[in-house]
Image (cartoon, grey):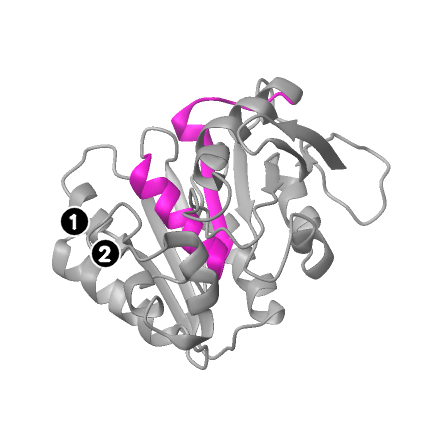
Amino acid sequence: MALLTCRFYSEVLNLSTSMTVLLPQQTQSQIGMENKMTSGKHQTLYLLHGLSDDDSIWTRRTSIERYAAPLGLAVVMPQVHHSFYTDMKYGNKFWTFLTEELPFIARSFFPLSEKREDNFVAGLSMGGYGALKWALNRPDQISAAASLSGVTDIAAVQKEDRLQPVLDLVFGNEEVKGTEHDLFSLIEKNTDRKDRPMLYQACGTEDFLYQGNVRFKEHCERSGYPLTSLFEPGEHEWGFWDKTIQDVLAWLPLKGQK
């Protein structure tokens, strides 16, 4: 695969930012790597970082390049700071950037498919929240979303002291329950849609976000929304995410893989 660090200007954010991108490359003599090149424009996984990280973190902490190489899958990893993938009350418009500007810019630079069935999103922790939020708010754009140790119950987390300074900047005094920021509410709105996105969640049983993930699973079951869940021993750490991103890639409805 080709690994690119792309620095570009965002009109939405009014600043220069970056994304890390993996692109399929067909090779014959590369030792220890199986690479695949698909014809036409590439299926794309938008892979989202967590609260303390940036667009480089997935390539630094996991073997995502090696895992994606035999799939012929492009991977786009954007930079969103502490935004919770939201148009912040006191900050920048990272939701608009993520869902509107980023796909447009990425497709103008690289041969990425614009078809809904070819676009997926996944993320960890804050990025797991962003992935589900994107798919459930814009099912016309995303066909499958995966959350790894995600902040699935944002209304409950909003009440906790540990993230309150960050979430006050993101949401201000707005209560997120029942809004477009609330994954529980979004599940109810999407349950009967014919184009509802496929959803996946994984969380370690020792993770501090485990109970919120259990509540999300139970809410999906009550609402009749299909959800693939994986709960197994693990904490909020990169060993767990390096393992479970491989499960996500195996779960995605990739061309020629099922």
Residue 117 image position (x, y, % from top left): 40, 29
Q: Is residue 253 above or below residue 56?
A: above
Q: Residue at x 67, y 55 (%)?
A: 57
Residue 200 is inside the magenta segment: no
Judging depth in this view, the residue of 38 and 21 nearest the camera is 21
Q: Quick check: can you spot residue 258?
A: no
Q: Is residue 139 above or below residue 59?
A: above
Residue 8 image position (x, y, % from top left): 69, 29
Judging depth in this view, the residue of 133 and 258 nearest the camera is 133
Around disc 1, counting alpha carbons within 10 Å, would you say few (fewer than 14), some (14 to 19), or many (20 or more)? some
Q: Quadrant of the C terminus?
A: top left
- What's the distance in space between the residues labelled 2 and 1, CA to CA? 7 Å
Query: Image quarter for residue 71?
Result: top right
Q: Residue at x 44, y 33 (%)?
A: 96
Q: Residue at x 51, y 27 (%)?
A: 101
Q: Quick check: can you spot residue 99?
A: yes
- The span shown in magenta is 110-138
Q: Quadrant of the N terminus?
A: top right
Q: Is residue 67 above or below residue 241?
A: above
Q: Residue at x 14, y 53 (%)?
A: 224
Residue under circle 1? 188
**Tag 1: residue type?**
Glu
Task: Kindly state the secondary structure of the residue where label 1 is placed.
Answer: helix
Residue 184: mark: 2
Specify whether 212 is left or right of 239: left
Task: Kindly state the secondary structure of the residue where label 2 is placed.
Answer: helix
